[in-house]
Image (cartoon, helix red, strand yellow):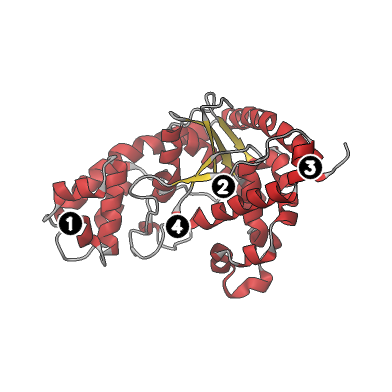
Amino acid sequence: MSADLQRVFSGIQPTGDLHLGNYLGAIKNFVALQKSHECIYCVVDMHALTEWQDPTELVGNIREVTAGFLSCGIDPKAHIVFNQSQVSQHAELAWIFNCVARMGWLNRMTQFKDKAGKNRENASTGLFTYPNLMAADILVYKATHVPVGEDQKQHLELARDIAKKFNNDFAQSIKAQGLEEEFFPIPEPLITGPATRVMSLRDGSRKMSKSEPSEMSRINLKDDADTIAKKIRKAKTDPQALPSEEKGLEGRPEADNLVGIFAALSDQSKAQVLKQFGGKQFSEFKPELAELAVSVLAPIGQEMARIADDSTYIEAVLSDGAERARAIAAPIMCDVRRIVGYIG
């Protein structure tokens, strides 16, 4: 990595049915960051196993997320696209971080509490230690920046704590090896855009998710133009006109969500969108939003369908990406092994 180029790492779980929230909250930003950063983008299939996955479906989902990356504009030749399980250094560093991180840190992770719910005792240990693997994903490449949604900020903060503790715990060994005092960089979050957290089209208080039973709650990247337009038309709203200023969106989650989606799809701020549509009813706004969404998303869906049919190409991209990822991770992991006192 050149001194003036910052390295970005991020990943998406292969759980199937990529949707608008994945695109606006993550992939669209991944594409933009290619212009300014060295980017490593990962299909985090090891994280997917924190909950049981049908093996056949998992294979298909890994390919689908990869097709989504490529269809949205991620360049696998200029940057790195791979699936996590092909690079063993992720798991090796995660174990070391299991021994660096503290139980109290993990007990504070709200996402584990949300996912485990009342069945905490039946949750997998992988779900509990998931943030340590996430830290390893980032730090095994010495990534300097991580694009994260609001729900991942706490996990990145943990990664920062782990990096600091490792650097402190092994300070003498790091110095003895002649390595930089701050062996692991402290990664910074990148939170960009007006729709980093896209909400359900049926309930503006809930995050857009494939786990919602209603298909009308989300726009899938594989949806065709007619389906996209229908879901926008049917999206829940309120009877008031759109406000002229952002403050008027307070207490109106559905309105705020749709304005945010329009802003993100059109590369504007919410304020700019409201300047255009303030005072107008949703009956005027929704057709404009539907037209915009179709123009941006329908071509992505068509390209995904084309790429998804070529499993040989997808697996070649992942294999090449994994080889290039290992070339970065392996020497860093060799330094870690020496630092902690392993032989060989």
Q: What whole-number distance in Å separates the C-alpha atoms at marks 3 and 4?
A: 45 Å
Q: What amino acid is at disc 3? A: Ser
Q: Secondary structure at mark 2?
A: loop
Identity, as a three-letter code, of the amino acid under mark 2: Pro
Q: Looking at the image, which residue sits at the far right?
A: 343
- Specify the quadrant that holds the C terminus: top right
Q: Measure how far apart labels 2 and 1 are at the Cα level.
A: 35 Å
- Mark 3 or 4 closer to N-term? 3
Distance of label 3 from label 1 (alpha carbons): 63 Å
Amino acid type shown at disc 1: Phe
Measure how far apart labels 4 and 1 are at the Cα level.
24 Å
Tell me which numbered mark, 3 or 1, is placed earlier along the sequence.
3
> In the figure, 101 relative to 178: above or below?
below
> Residue at point 35% right, 40% down?
297
Q: Amino acid at mark 4?
A: Ser
Distance from disc 2 to disc 4, alpha carbons, whole Å, reads 13 Å
Give me the disc on residue 173.
Answer: 3
Element at label 3: helix
What residue do we see at 75% from left, 47% from top? 170
Are discs 4 and 1 less than 8 Å apart at CB?
no
Q: Residue at x 49, y 36 (%)?
A: 69
- Tag 1, which secondary structure? helix
Of residues 46 and 133, the one nearer the viewer is 133
